[in-house]
Amino acid sequence: MPELPEVETVRRGLERQLPGESVLAVEVLRSDSIAYPEVGQFCELLVGHRFQKLMRRGKYLLIELDRNAGLAVHLRMSGRLLLVDKKVKAGPHLRVRIKISGGRELRFEDMRVFGRLWYVPSGSQFEKIVSGLAELGVEPLEALSASDLKVALANRSQAIKSSLLDQTVIAGIGNIYADESLFEAGINPLRSARDLSLDELVRLAEKIKIVLERAIALGGSSIRDYTDSSGVNGSYQHESLVYGRAGQPCRVCATAIERIRLVGRSTHFCKQCQPARGKKRKKGF
């Protein structure tokens, strides 16, 4: 699933090209890709709007339109939002086609059909229309601190990896960057969230930001379906420290990276660099 770095990469790509363009026509090829309102209204209401500002909240892409309206997109498992010339042949998984000025189209492709689009009517708030948006936790790139983590994790006996995947704790982190952040912080993913020390929380908050910023700089991770708004793959997957590297030597200590299942998700870690009990970390992190 595209996580914060992937969605932020898409946002930045569209921010450079989309503002000022107008919606000329909308075609929905798969009705369940539209979350709100019903398909006919979605198409009718979106036409005529001008794109203004591109924002992101967690894994949601939020687009401000003129007349105080909006368009929200959640890519979910396999969604792609592409800005292309209208002459470019559409892919087999095209779900929504938004024709815009300048001879281009904003296309939503989604192989697994879990992604959703919302039209936010004039005068409404994104949080009132888009499901799950109001419950999101702190934005890690903007305001994440050890204090935030301490409050959010105080009563959580579950594994810290599971807590990081909870979008009400921190918005935007998924499986890849939870594994990477915990490795860089030297914290075992199975540790109880509420048992982390203040020093560990300080380190974790710092490493989360570093990992996410590094991933954004590399255009995100293209492991299956993800591309940016121009169809270009990200490259973070080639630089990952633990994710996707089961059985390979740790880049710090050469111990084989382990992979386990945790709450139904693959979890990657180094048992030497991320001890089960918060032992003193080795130099090199």
Image (spheres, grey):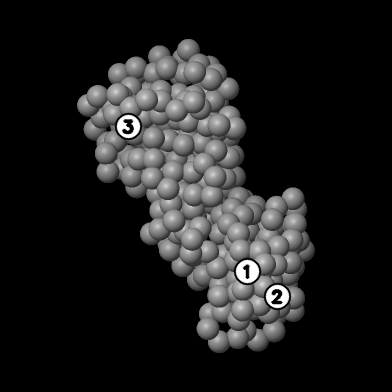
Disc 2 to disc 1, C-alpha distance: 13 Å
- Check disc 2 and report its element: helix, strand or loop: loop
Q: Amino acid at mark 3?
A: Val
For the residues bearing labels 3 and 2, Cβ distance under 8 angstroms: no
Identify the residue position indicated by label 3 in the image.
84
In the picture, the disc for residue 271 is: 2
Q: Pinpoint residue 40: horizontal percent, then vertical percent.
A: 48, 12
**CB under 8 Å between discs 3 and 1:** no
First-in-chain label (3 vs 2): 3
Mark 1 lies on residue: 248
Determine the residue positioned at 29% across, 29% down: 85
Residue 61 seen in the current view: yes
> Is residue 190 rendered to the left or right of residue 15?
right
Which of the 4 quarters of the picture holds residue 77?
top right
- 26 left or right of 162 in image: left
Q: Secondary structure at mark 1?
A: loop
Circle 3 crowding by C-alpha within 10 Å: few under 14, some 14–19, many from 20? some
Q: Nearer the viewer, residue 11 or 57?
A: 11
Residue 104 place in picture, x, y as percent: 28, 27
Which residue is rendered at x = 53% and y = 80% of the image?
285
Q: Earlier in the sequence, mark 3 or mark 1?
A: 3
Tell me the crowding category of disc 2: few under 14, some 14 to 19, or many 20 or more residues within 10 angstroms, Cα based. some
Q: Is residue 215 above or below residue 195?
A: above
Q: Earlier in the sequence, mark 2 or mark 1?
A: 1
Asked whether the viewer can see residue 130, the reply is no
Q: Secondary structure at mark 3?
A: strand
Judged from this view, the residue extending furthest toward the right is 157
